[in-house]
Structure formats: structure tokens, C-alpha cells
Image (cartoon, helix red, strand yellow):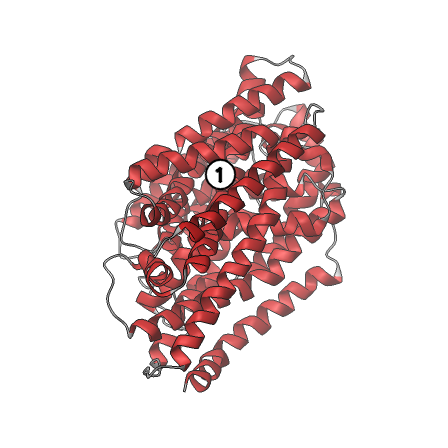
Amino acid sequence: MVTYSSMLVVALYLAVTIVISYLVNVRHKNGGDYSTGGQQFGWFTAGVSILATYISAMTFVGMPGWVYSSGMEAMSIHLNYPIVIFFATIFFVPVFYKLGLTSIYEYLELRFGVVARTINSLVFILVQCISSGVILYAIALILVQVLPVSIAEAIICISIFTAIYTYAGGISTVIWTDMLQSAVLVIGTICIIAILVFNISSGDYATPSPDLLNIVNSSFDLGIDTTIWAGVFAVTFLHLSVYGTNQLIIQRTLATRSVDHAKKSMLLCGYGAFFIYLIFAVLGVLLSIYYQGHPFENSNEVILDFVFNHTNPIVIGLIISALAAAAMSTLDSTYNSMATVATFDIYKRFINKDGTGKHYESVARKLSLIAAASVVLPALFAISNESVLKTIASLTSIFVGIRLGSFVLGLFFDKANEKGVIAGSIISIIAVFAAQSSAISWPWFAPIGTAVFLVFGVLASAKWGENSKANERFIHSQKDLITRPSMSQYGLLVFAVISIAACFVIPKWLLAAFA
């Protein structure tokens, strides 16, 4: 039950967020700070922000709901993070940082031309509108439990609040509020788990079935979306497009003090994501035990039902704040990154090439408000009974061929040119839509789209077009931007093997613990 105590906790959290936004805005007034924060951040702060941005409310609400309805096989989708971060910190992060980019899509103009840059900028904005719409819907589910408003009204209110503090402080506000939001998220999760464990241990509940706890599904059926092969291989392409070629994530690394800090910030995610997803998967199992598998019309509502009906008012307020924090950490990042891309890849490139730093900062702030408004409509269409985590992954998989393929083509195929990017973009989208009409599950859309993009990108480049002399000079110089792996980066591959092996024994440990 929501009481005044609950709302007091929420109000306190919102007040602290606004204060942080104000202090950051007062402190940073130099042009360029809106998008890069003056490159003031250390690896830990930026790394926590990266984790908070992508894990967010879609994990808080979606992962327990997914496990509740489908079992712990959903963990397989998240076993690829160490592999993904290994490649991202070798090939993508150091290249973007050493080039001194504000938008990573500037790289594509240097390598191919303005058309390649514009295609990817527009695809990024479209994908962020879709994914943020799903996240906005997830947090609206929470607000309608607290206030007498409809989901549509909740979506609008949340978007307005998040837009205001993002407008005020830029990337600095985003990163510092992510620190606060992460702390609240951790405390809220611990509270839920503690209450569930206490209730289950003091009651008479059946032991979960081995099928619910099983993580590794070794089936070669491409129609199953939670096999070990889909998680370790197929979704690696999707996550590499998120952590290697996505302005939303890379912008945080560009705000760090050095390229070493940039890479270390990503390593935090590479080593930490497995444990975070495991915690939320176990939370889904605990909810399944507590409710004894009671069916819910919408799996996303499982954790919300427990919070609002089976905890005390203080915890409710904390959980509301935690869930709001998780969602807003992604929304504020999205508005900032969309504004950055729209400003530097579209406005500066085509409308006003000779503005000052302060002028572009002002434009970016205004565009962040437009970005906030643009995700409202996708949020209204995101209403679904599917796990929000599954929904967002399946939708964004459609465009992975373009998002990842463009950068891979630029880095590793010297003869590739802009005509190849155009051909690859068109045919990869067609290929993914064709795959959707088959019995193939969504994780495989990403490798299919990427492979088709690269094949037709190389073939089209060999047949048509050529690189300019400026492109040729850049091709020869970019090889010096890629760094050799360090021991901590090689450690990611070792950790990947260990975490996959652990998935064979974790179900046995959990079964023994619950018994």
C-alpha cells in the first residue's frame, strides 16, 4: 500500500536529483561540456554510468518477469558481455577516443563520406526512439500503481521530468545522477530480495523445479531464443552494436580523462554484468517460489505486484525510487546522446557549419527536449505482455547490420567505400525482415543482418564507387589507433569461459539452497 511515507521517500530522491542537476549546471559553463562533460570523469564513475544506462528498468522489471515466465534460460542471453567488451575496448573505444570525436558517427564521414555518417546517425536516432519508448513504458507501469493516472499520462509526466534535468546539466548531470540512481537501485534490489527470502523461509513453499533453474539449453533449434548458442554467439553481435558502436554508451567513455580510463570504464561492465543479471534472474526465481507459479497476464507486473502488495510503505517508496532511478538513468542518457548526434551530425553538418561551441551547446540543449518528446509515441505503442527486456532486444536487433556493419566495414576492409555502406544498409534490412517472417528467433537477426551487410558491402564496393584521397589517407592512419590487448582485457575471455562453465553448476547450487 502506498502511503505518505512512500511518497516522502520518492520526493526526497527527486529533490536530490534536481539539486545535482543544478550544481552541475552552475559548475560547468564552458562550451562543449554538454556532450563531453569536459572529460573530467574517472573510469569508475563512467563505468557505473554505463552499467546504469543499459541495465536500467528494463532489467529491473523485465529480467525477473522473463525468468518467472520462461525460467533461468534467459540468463544465456547475457553470457556474452566479457566477449563483447573485449572487442569493444580493442577496436572501437580507443579509435573513437583518440580521434577526439564528439559523435562517433564523425568516424564514418572520415572513413567513407557524409552519406554513411548520415545513414547511421538517423538509424541511431530511430533505434533510440524505439528502445527508449519501451523503457518509458516500463516506468509508466510503476507510476500508475502509485498515482491515479493512466499509462499515457504517466509516460508524458516522466518524459517531461527527465527532460528538464537533462536539459539543465548535459552529460555531466547524466553521469552524476547515474551514480545516485545506481546506489538507490542496489539498495532497492537488496530490500526486495531480503523480504522475499524472509517470507519464503518462514512459510511453506514448494521447491522450484529443475526446469525453472536450468540455464544452459544446448538445442540447435534456431526458433528458441534462449539457447546457449543464441546467447554466446548471436546476441554477441547485438551487444557489440550496443557497447561498441552506440553513441549512447560510447559518449560516456569520451567523457573520461584518458583512453585508459575509457577502456577501464568498459571493463567494469565486462566483469560486472554477469553478476547483475544473475541477481535479477534469482529474483525472478524467488518470485516464482513466492507466487507458486501463479499466472500473470503481463509478466512485467510480477515484481510490481510483490512490491506494492507484500512490502511496507518505506520499502515501497524506496522501490519506486529505485525503479524510477533505473529507467531515468537510461532516458536521460538517451535524450543527451540523441541531442548530441542531431546537433553534430545533422545540424552542424548541414545547417550551420560555422557556429561557436556555445551555440552548438545551446542547440543540443534544445534538441534534448525534442528528443524527450519523440519517445512518447513509441512508448504508447510499446504496451505489451512480453518482457520489456525481450521486447527491446528483439526490436533493436533489426538494425544491428547497419549499426555494427558500418564500423566493421570501415575498420577491417580497406577497399570498402560509401557505395558499399549504402548497398549493405538496404539489403541487410531486407534480410532481417525476411528472417522475421521465418521461424528464426530474434537473437539471430543480428548476425544475419551483420553478415549480409558485410558481404554486400564488400561486393558493392568492388563493383561501384571509390574512396576519396582524404578517405585513403585516413584508412592508412587509422590502424595506429587500435591498441594491443592488456592482461585485464585478456582476462575477460577467461572470465567468459568461467561464467559459462558456472552456468552448468549454478542450478544445482540454487536447487540445494532452496531445498
Residue where numbered disc 1 is placed: 457
Q: Residues within 10 Å of mark 1 (few under 14, many from 20)?
A: many
Q: Which residue is drawn at 42% across and 62% down?
A: 230
Q: For the view shown, which residue lies furthest in the front direction?
A: 4
Q: Nearer the viewer, residue 120 or 139?
A: 139
Horizontal placement of 86 versus 480: left or right?
A: left
Q: Position of residue 189 (x, y in %)?
A: 49, 62
Q: The residue tagged with tag 1: helix, strand or loop?
A: helix
Against 94, residue 426 (above or below) is above
Q: In which quarter of the image is residue 41?
A: top right
Q: Where is residue 185 in the image (x, y as percent from the top left)?
A: 52, 55
Q: Which of 417 and 440 is in front in this view?
A: 440
**Amino acid marked by disc 1:** Gly
Q: Where is residue 499 in the image (x, y as percent from the top left)?
A: 56, 71
Q: Where is residue 194 in the image (x, y as percent from the top left)?
A: 48, 71
Horizontal placement of 149 versus 5: left or right?
A: left
Horizontal placement of 82 versus 228: left or right?
A: right
